[in-house]
Image (cartoon, helix red, strand yellow):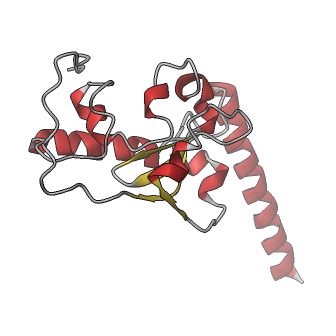
Amino acid sequence: MKKSSLLSQGLIGLSWSILLFFLASYLITESWTWGYRGKWTNINTYMPKKERVFTDQELAKYDGSDASLPLYLAIDGDVYDVSEGRGWYGKGGSYHHFAGKDAARAYVTGCFEDHLTHDMRGLSYDQIKGIDHWKKFYENHHKYYKIGTVIHDPIPEDAPIPEPCKKAVAQKP
């Protein structure tokens, strides 16, 4: 009888400690997670879903032109749901040019007219690392989450490498 009483008191004490931990977090940071905002606070991280496979044509349907559909973008073949950022990626948004396509090259060249393509031929090692940085941004975002992959048509061997962009937006240091 004494062991169960000690165990129940321990569980009650643990419950109060957890409650006070989260309450203190909210009172100090106005967040239940001590200000942490990453993929672990996104409920979609914990909901297993079968990943979808898109073609370029299928992905283009999710560019924000139909408000009843979710908003997707792809980078280096991985497709992310960015519907929570409709103000940024939807029609009229600053990053609408990325919606409904894999525009990996434009993320690192800053050319949002001619480089909205998945073609990464001719990019430098640092630019490829830059694309990896953007992939991690979407993978670890607290609102966006991966929903699948996009299968691109092969780039013809005789297709020219995209020309360097003359209207590129300057990269931040």
User: Is 84 drawn above or below residue 120 in the view shown?
Assistant: above
For the point 33% across and 34% down, the residue is 116
Residue 105 relative to residue 59: left or right: left
User: Is 55 drawn above or below residue 168 in the view shown?
Assistant: below
For the point 66% across and 26% down, the residue is 30
| Residue 46, horizontal then vertical, whole percent | 63, 60
Taking depth in this image into account, of 20 and 89 the one nearest to the observer is 89
Q: Residue furthest front?
A: 158
- For the C terminus, give its image quadrant: top left
| Residue 75, horizontal then vertical, whole percent | 38, 46
For the point 79% across and 73% down, the residue is 7
| Residue 160, horizontal then vertical, whole percent | 13, 43
For the point 43% across and 46% down, the residue is 74
| Residue 117, horizontal then vertical, whole percent | 31, 40
Q: Quadrant of residue 165?
A: top left
Taking depth in this image into account, of 30 and 55 the one nearest to the observer is 55
